[in-house]
Amino acid sequence: MPDRDALPHTVRVFAPASVSNLGCGFDIFGMALEGIGDEVVVRAVEGTGIVSVTVSGDAGRVPTDPARNAAALAVDGVLNRLESAAGVAIQVRKGIPMASGLGGSAASAVAGAVAADALLGGNLDRTALLECAMIGERKGSGANHADNAAPSLIGGFVLVLPGTPPQMVQLPTPDDLVVAVAHPHMEVETRQARMILGHTIPLMAGVQQWGNAAGMVAGLFRGDWELIARCLCDAVAEPVRGKLVPGFERVRASAVEAGAIGAGLSGSGPSVFALCRGRDPAERVVTAMAEAFRDEAGVESDTVISAARAAGARILDLRIGTR
């Protein structure tokens, strides 16, 4: 075991927001975003297990009960994996809007897992950290998928293969691939959006989805913009979930008209993402999407522009001293 006097007493970690599904990749594709995310601070304190949880930036909406908080559940997962009886206090600082489709619960869970591992000197590998984060993500989304948690953890454009353990594959992207995101001031609850999908799909919809997902991977490896654009189509979830987001069809169309190669719902929405070839087109696209939300739904939007190779979770502050 590490020398306790050499271990930090406080660790602060940032984990980015993410776009998931990316059209054809329902529950398997995700991409990290620059400049927006959650922070988690984990401190060593007297006691055993999770002693306290506080949350800021959420207007009092995120539960502080350790059994219901995504970051706390991920921290508890690390404690159990390391067989540690340490006492910890957790502070969550929300930077991702609630029910936005940008992986808020996943980011909190990832930041919690990474911070707890650093605090305890566990040196868990990234697969173990993902599994701990998914414990918290399940509570937030109601499903066992890692298409938000994986890119939030390792960054970039990620393919997550389902199964135990989950496998993350960081996919290559063209140098000038940029994602533009418009987050309208409305909410779509992830559990509700998942429930309306049902449990079966038509065979032809499945064939189209599988072909598009395979084509997306090929397009990214080859840097084939036409193939990437062709495969940015969701035949399974978006036709159903799009109805939950007022103005969605017009917003998506406006993105393409402004120069995006394609656009769609980020996760279950209501945020809409668009893939662009360069930052200048992305600026035009994100402005057009925000205007479309204003005109069609009467709501304002927050916007994000990010390189496709955004970094994953990172330690911001680590303080070593007497525990």
Image: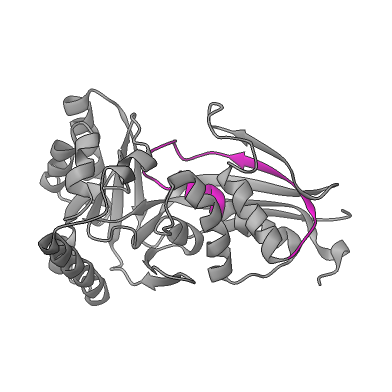
- In reply to whether residue 102 is colored magenta, the answer given is yes
Instruction: State the residue in front, 291 or 169.
Output: 169
Asked whether residue 224 appears in the rendered view, the answer is yes
Q: In this view, does 292 lie to the left or right of 49?
A: left
How far across and how far down the image is residue 140, in percent? Answer: 48, 45
Q: Which quarter of the rendering shows the N terminus?
A: bottom right
Instruction: State the residue in front, 297 or 200.
Output: 200
How far across and how far down the image is residue 298, in percent? Answer: 23, 22
Asked whether residue 117 appears in the rendered view, the answer is no
Q: Is residue 115 left or right of residue 177?
A: right
How far across and how far down the image is residue 173, in percent? Answer: 31, 68
Residue lying farthest to the front in this orientation: 199
How far across and how far down the image is residue 235, in percent? Answer: 16, 55
- In reply to whether residue 108 is colored magenta, the answer given is yes
Q: On the image, which quarter does residue 299 sit in?
A: top left
Residue lying farthest to the top in this orientation: 298
Q: Give the range drawn in magenta.
A: 83-109
Instruction: State the residue in front, 126 or 291.
Output: 126
Instruction: State the residue in front, 199 or 288.
Output: 199
Q: In this view, does 7 lie to the left or right of 11?
A: right
Above or below: residue 296 compared with residue 83: above
Above or below: residue 110 compared with residue 160: above
| Residue found at x 70% / y 59% | 79
| Residue found at x 22% / y 72% | 214
| Residue found at x 43% / y 51% | 34
Q: On the image, which quarter does residue 250 sit in?
A: top left
| Residue found at x 43% / y 46% | 141
